[in-house]
């Protein structure tokens, strides 16, 4: 049986705003959090801004005390919070970094060694011996993060560091962080971005307004989180509140007008597969009812990532066989079933948003597209990890992973 | 590595005083490192560097010698310029601690945004920084005592006691100011003004005998008057402070410990609101 690394019991944190003034009032940032983290587990914490994620990390790091309940931590903690805050501007980078190591309990020899490592990570050259007030923001961050990564620990606590610095630093930092994580037993990381959570974490805690909304395996929580985002976002689009059931599985938001009605949309794996994975591909089954003649409808499927970026659009290619078939249905009235097959080994694992829309063409010569239905049908679907093997873990922002042909000559 | 060894428990219960003091002791490396870092940072990029810690008291005593030895004369038992200089460094010590450490928890909140340490460390390390000036000043005084041919007092062995009393006067003000200024920021402005008044009612440049005897309670409620009398007794051989002085000094000791107790209870609030 695995040992418990962190145990959080009935943790509540309250703050008083405007303390010392007549407008002071108490707010509860965390309410009744219960969580057990075992050795070896990697936990992500997701939630909207102000949901208490960062406060929870501060409590776990001992920087902020609970108002109620208790937290037991077994193991050395290294937290990458408020990085570089305690650097004094008039001292040099080397002095500040050494001081940071000493404050964290290193001996002077050990600190010298750590300084070398941190400096080589930061790549600031001779600036190491200049006062840090002369540093650019980038240099400052590189040195501060580099210093943080030199401390040994059993539990690493990280807050949203993935969005820090410029692109090249981010990549380097991620690589270094991965190396650090692979040596560390436990990871607790906060992120806005559910994709980071599933690529780094085994488990996930979802906080909503200071309360724990869901606790479980990273992929499960991530998927539920997507649905919630979609529900809120789309409720606004459709100007009515949607429940969770209308977004996943065989349910969808029904749309209809005098031209056609969208009867059903089903997203699933091709026959022979139990679930949608990278290796199974995805089948979109759509049933419409065509109400008029002399019109035909081109289906289109948009696929969006977690930030609602459109990453893929599927439609019949002009003059292809599919296009010909659609045109041949011009004078049919009644139910039409169609299946759109997204081939395997293209869409990587993750949760996606999907929209089905129809364009209306009244003559085969028409070039421009007009939407047949005002609103598209929207759904959430999940492609599981399946048997996928990755060479590197840092591919979390990759959605399209086509299997390509490679030729070698030697 | 056995992870059980590093078990910590965080809850809302404030620590008991022995446990709190133990955690201060366990974190004593912060004290030395922070003081040293601050001293280094103070003199970083200056031409004289750390020598400034010596130059400042030296300049002070040169001025005192010129003004009070050559020009002004006040009837005191010991040479007046030494009398005034002891008064000055002692007052500066108190002033330095109480004013510089009174807002240290707001000034260095970066430290507890990064490290989980008992907050008492902060006023303590500020006191260490200020102590450097005091100690160099004392060394200069002793040199001058020998130079003036004054006898080394038998009361010298009590010097550490009065130095600690001096330290406690400053610490008491600093600890309470830090605790109370979470809720009442006005303290940051009120305190320097109050201490400014204290400068004039404390016998720094004048002997306590100049205060009329029906106002002598002014001396007895002022703990710094007791500290000055004690320091002048053990260095310059002035009369031993009379017993009423020790009432306010004991009050200072009690209020300091009370401040530590109060601080240990509201530590978590300081982290939240400082």
Image: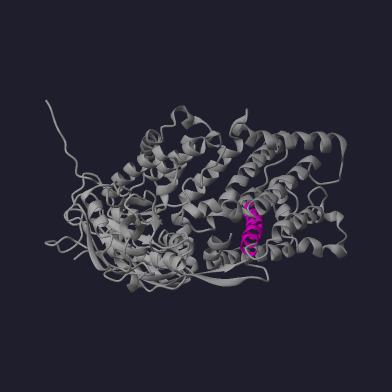
Q: Name the residue located 57 percent from the left edge and 39 percent from the top edge.
A: B41
Q: Position of residue A398 (x, y in %)?
A: 30, 47
Q: Would residue B90 appear left or right of A285 to someone viewing this image?
A: right
Q: Is residue A142 visible?
A: yes
Q: Would residue A22 appear left or right of A66 to someone viewing this image?
A: right
Display colour scheme: one colour
Q: Would residue A9 appear left or right of B216 to someone viewing this image?
A: left
Q: Is residue B168 magenta?
A: yes
Q: Position of residue A170 (x, y in %)?
A: 39, 42
Look at the image and tell me in which quarter the N terminus of chain A lies: bottom left
On screen, residue B64 above or below B24: above
Look at the image and tell me in which quarter the C terminus of chain A lies: top left
Q: Position of residue A270 (x, y in %)?
A: 16, 60
> Which of the pair B102/A160 is nearer the observer?
A160
Q: Position of residue A28 (x, y in %)?
A: 50, 71
Q: Would residue B79 appear left or right of A180 to someone viewing this image?
A: right
Q: Which of the 4 image quarters holds residue B134?
A: top right
Q: Is residue B102 magenta?
A: no
- Magenta extent: B162-180
Q: Name the residue located 32 percent from the left edge and 56 percent from the top edge.
A: A300
Residue sitting at the far top: A410
Q: Which of the 4 image quarters holds residue B269?
A: bottom right
């Amino acid at each position: 049986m695995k040992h418990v690394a962190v145990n959080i019991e009935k943790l509540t944190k309250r703050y008083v705003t405007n303390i010392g003034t007549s407008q002071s009032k108490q707010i509860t940032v965390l309410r009744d959090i219960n969580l057990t983290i075992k050795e070896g587990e990697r936990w992500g914490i997701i939630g909207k801004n102000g949901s208490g994620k960062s406060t929870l990390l501060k409590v776990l790091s001992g920087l902020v005390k609970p108002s109620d309940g208790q937290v037991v931590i077994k193991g050395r903690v290294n937290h990458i919070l408020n990085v570089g805050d305690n650097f004094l501007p008039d001292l040099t980078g080397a002095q500040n970094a050494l001081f940071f190591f000493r404050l964290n309990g290193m001996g002077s020899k050990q600190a010298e060694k750590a300084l070398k490592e941190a400096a080589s990570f930061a790549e600031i050259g001779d600036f190491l011996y200049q006062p840090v007030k002369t540093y650019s923001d980038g240099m400052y961050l590189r040195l501060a993060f580099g210093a943080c990564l030199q401390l040994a620990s059993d539990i690493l606590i990280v807050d949203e560091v993935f969005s820090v610095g410029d692109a090249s630093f981010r990549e380097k930092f991620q690589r270094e962080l991965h190396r650090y994580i692979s040596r560390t037993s436990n990871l607790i990381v906060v992120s806005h971005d559910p994709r980071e959570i599933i690529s780094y974490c085994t488990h996930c805690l979802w906080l909503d307004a200071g309360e724990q909304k869901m606790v479980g395996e990273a992929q499960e929580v991530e998927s539920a989180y997507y649905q919630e985002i979609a529900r809120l976002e789309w409720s606004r689009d459709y100007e009515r509140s949607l429940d969770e059931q209308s977004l996943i599985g065989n349910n969808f938001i029904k749309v209809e007008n005098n031209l056609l009605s969208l009867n059903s949309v089903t997203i699933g794996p091709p026959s022979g597969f139990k679930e949608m994975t990278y290796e199974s591909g995805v089948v979109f089954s759509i049933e419409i009812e065509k109400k008029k003649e002399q019109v035909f409808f081109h289906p289109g499927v948009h696929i969006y990532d977690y930030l609602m970026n459109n990453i893929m659009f599927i439609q019949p290619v002009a003059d292809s066989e599919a296009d010909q078939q659609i045109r041949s249905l011009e004078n049919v009235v009644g139910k039409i079933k169609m299946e759109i097959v997204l081939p395997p080994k293209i869409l990587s694992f993750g949760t996606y948003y999907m929209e089905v829309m129809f364009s209306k063409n009244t003559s085969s010569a028409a070039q421009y597209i007009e939407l047949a239905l005002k609103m598209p049908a929207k759904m959430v679907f999940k492609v599981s990890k399946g048997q996928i093997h990755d060479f590197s873990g840092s591919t979390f922002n990759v959605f399209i992973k086509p299997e390509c042909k490679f030729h070698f000559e030697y | 590595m056995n992870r059980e060894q590093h078990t910590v428990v965080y809850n809302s219960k404030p620590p008991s005083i022995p446990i709190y003091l133990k955690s201060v002791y366990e974190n004593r490396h912060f004290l030395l490192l922070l003081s040293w870092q601050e001293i280094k940072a103070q003199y970083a990029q200056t031409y004289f560097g750390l020598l400034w810690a010596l130059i400042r008291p030296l300049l002070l005593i040169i001025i005192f010698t010129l003004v009070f030895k050559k020009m002004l004369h006040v009837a005191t038992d010991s040479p007046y310029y030494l009398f005034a200089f002891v008064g000055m460094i002692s007052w500066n010590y108190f002033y330095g601690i109480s004013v510089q450490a009174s807002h240290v928890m707001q000034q260095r909140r970066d430290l507890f945004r990064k490290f989980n340490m008992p907050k008492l460390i902060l006023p303590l390390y500020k006191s260490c920084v200020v102590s450097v000036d005091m100690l160099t000043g004392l060394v200069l005084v002793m040199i001058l005592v020998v130079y003036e041919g004054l006898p080394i007092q038998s009361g010298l062995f009590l010097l550490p006691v009065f130095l600690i009393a001096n330290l406690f006067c400053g610490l008491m003000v600093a600890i309470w100011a830090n605790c109370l200024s979470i809720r009442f920021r006005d303290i940051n402005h009120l305190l320097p003004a109050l201490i400014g008044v204290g400068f004039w009612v404390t016998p720094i440049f004048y002997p306590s005998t100049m205060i009329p005897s029906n106002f002598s309670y002014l001396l007895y409620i002022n703990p710094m008057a007791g500290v000055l009398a004690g320091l002048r007794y053990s260095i310059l051989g002035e009369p031993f402070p009379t017993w009423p002085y020790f009432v306010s000094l004991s009050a200072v000791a009690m209020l300091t410990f009370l401040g530590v107790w109060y601080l240990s209870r509201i530590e978590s609030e300081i982290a939240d609101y400082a």
